Image: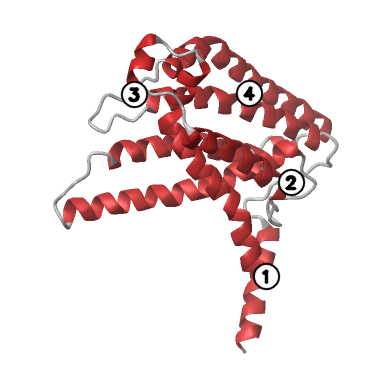
Amino acid sequence: MRASSASRELLWPLVFVFAAGYLAWYTPRLIVFSGHASDAMITRFPTAGVLEFLALFGAIGSLVIGVLTIRPTAQEGTNMGVFDRMSLFMGRVTMLLIVSLVLVMFYEVVARYVFEKPTLWANELSLWMAGAIFLFSGLYAMQQRSHIRIYLLYDMMPRNLQRVCDLFSTALIVGFAFVMLWGSYNEARDKFMRWETFGTAFDPPIPATIKPLLIVFICLVALQAVINLINDWGKDKEIHAVVDESEIEEFVQEMGAKLTKKG
């Protein structure tokens, strides 16, 4: 039962990865269909067909269903809002992308060093996927409060002063997101609307996709930081140990259960 539940939960992230991956290559057709494409883009790309709209609805539908059906693990916490669940969903997507990235690199190594037939696409595809992984995982890390933090002075403060520090750090994150949006929006929009590519033999649209995603996910991380601040405001003071004793205790219990089962 537990294995089947896990496989069902990974279904929607998998659908999202395939649909979003298709759109990452064929979005210009949707731009042409919308009537906002430049003359240069119209000459390069045909208008959207059935597959493009199926991919679009598949990406949106799998995101919505995945957010509604995702089940946080014991380590990920409970009592989450919709935005928290979306961050968890992007964490699942990140896991699948990491697996895909490893497979691409493994294929390239075998093709290059065993069959002496290197590919033209593995390096750029790996770079493209790594950029997406970096952005998606950043949102998940913010939701899980697993980004790098130094607690040496923080733990010595009273709870009210800790709240002031949390408010200040969140303000810095929101301010950085605002500056990035203000300074990079026009550039990201132009790269997207002209569908700027990488300029290699494979020629993937890395600038056209990663630049807008960078701005979108910086804003999402800032929004998640605000949500974390609101959710953590009423919590009692915590002492952050070097080693999480609850994780050790849980690990010992799992190992004890397995040894008992074998015995």
The residue to which callout 2 is attached is 239
Secondary structure category for the residue under label 1 = loop
Is disc 3 placed on a helix, strand or loop?
A: loop
Q: From the image, tell me which residue sits under label 4.
A: 173
Please, which residue is most extreme toward the front here? 50
Using the image, tell me which numbered label, if any, was put on residue 1: 1
Of circles 4 and 3, the one toward us is 3
Q: Tell me what residue is drawn at x 36 percent, y 36 percent.
A: 127
Residue 75: image location, x then y, percent: 68, 54
Give the mark, 4 or 1, whose residue is nearer the N terminus: 1
Residue occupying the point 16% across, 49% down: 117
First along the sequence among labels 2 and 3 = 3
Rounded to the nearest whole Å, what is the CA distance between mark 1 and mark 3? Answer: 45 Å
Q: Judge whether 68 appears above or below 181 on screen.
A: below
Q: Give the amino acid type for the residue marked by disc 4 in the picture.
A: Ile
Pointer 1 or 3: first along the chain: 1
Which residue, as the protein is rendered here, is positioned at the far left? 116
For the point 42% across and 16% down, the residue is 191
CA separation in Å, label 4 and label 3: 30 Å
Residue 110 - label: none
User: Which circle's residue, 4 or 3, is located before the other in the chain?
Assistant: 4
Residues at circles 2 and 3 in contact by the CB criterion of under 8 Å: no
Q: Residues within 10 Å of mark 1 (few under 14, many from 20)?
A: few
Identify the mark at residue 197; answer none if there is no mark: 3
Q: Is residue 171 above or below residue 21?
A: above
SS for callout 2: loop
Cα distance between the residues tagged 2 and 3: 48 Å
Secondary structure category for the residue under label 4? helix
Amino acid, disc 2: Ile
Instruction: Using the image, determine if residue 184 lies above or below residue 228.
Output: above
Quarter of the figure that contains the N terminus: bottom right
